[in-house]
Image (cartoon, grey):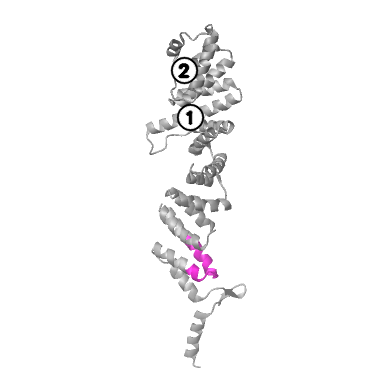
Amino acid sequence: MTFKARRKGLRVGLALVMTALVLSPLTGQQKVPYSIQDYQVYKAAIDQPELGKREDAIIGFMKAKPSSKLSEYALGNYVKLLQEYQTKGNHRKVVSAGEKLLALKPNEPNALRMVTYAAFQSRQLQKAAQYGEKFYAKMPSAGLAYILAMSYGTKNQAKYISYGEKAVAGLKPAETFQIVAELTNIYVAKKQWKRASEYGRKTIRAFGAIKKPQGTSQAEWDKYVKMQTAIAHGAVGRNAAESRNWGGAISSYSRALRATSSRGLRGEAYFYIGMGRWQQNRIDDAMKAFARGSVQRGAPHAKHCRKHLEQLYKSTHNDSLAGIEEFVERVS
């Protein structure tokens, strides 16, 4: 065989072998678990200037050479590509490109993290919950719990409560004002007064520390704050009433009255203020509260207020209701 032929054969062999030899100052020779040809394909993929084409080229290489050491380097370059999209604020591209990688490597933590946050930022909430669950199982955090709670929303109440409470436990009240307010509402509806009171207090602190978010009108914000604050004070007051802490109930319900025009909450507030004043033997003040509650038409507590008003009125007017309507009109 001629020298020229031998040289040609050597080049062909190097292109075909699965292991090449390189010099090492320490060992003299070191095995590199990929071929020159594989390296050339890998290099062309990661150097592709167009990001969309680079996505497919890298993913294609990883699929074709799953056991190659170069696939690990390809993975690192793909994560850098996702970071490029993220830096540019192109959240939808982070999601679509990230899902290509997750289809190949479902538990890749960097992709799970970036896709979760990008999906949340781009309001792809179902995907944010889907990938966020997997990432939370690997790396739980209060911030991620917040994203999961907001992604699920109150339609999935069990998930909302689970992640919402974790978020509130690890973040400041002002950072979770929406969640603490919603948890207050949920526990009020469940009549779990102790929990409602706990989150009610957090709601009150949160709204005392936060400024109006950008993009929300002042009128809209003021309405929202007053409504949620009133509900929160009502929750604290109801828990106090259930515990027969009448001073606390009167104080909290009085604050609720100053913050709400809701007949339902006003009727409830006047009822428990009346009950508190009655227990304190302040009968005139109790009757005034019951009278004011009785005129909150449609409120669940209005009938109870009327019943107790009549009972107390009779006890102070020789068992007669004469003049009660004038009294109600005068104090209401």
User: Mark 2 — residue?
Assistant: 292
Any mark on residue 127, and which?
A: none
Task: Give the crowd class for mark 1: few <14, some 14-19, many >=20 residues within 10 Å.
Answer: many
- Name which residue lies at 49% across and 61% down: 103
Q: Which secondary structure lies at badge 1?
A: helix
- Residue 76: give x, y in percent of width and height: 51, 62
Task: Give the crowd class for mark 2: few <14, some 14-19, many >=20 residues within 10 Å.
Answer: many
- Residue 73: give x, y in percent of width and height: 51, 65
Q: In this orientation, does residue 255 appear?
A: no
Between 171 and 219, the residue placed more toward the observer is 219
User: Mark 1 — residue?
Assistant: 229
Whichever of callouts 1 and 2 sits on the residue coming sooner in the sequence is 1
Please say if 36 is above or below 105: below
Q: Which secondary structure lies at badge 2?
A: helix
Q: Amino acid at mark 2?
A: Arg
Q: Amino acid at mark 1?
A: Thr
Specify the quadrant of the image occupied by residue 220. Answer: top left
Farthest-out residue, bottom: 1
Counting labels gives 2
Between 95 and 230, the residue placed more toward the observer is 230
Please say if 179 is above or below 81: above
Magenta stretch, main secondary structure class: helix
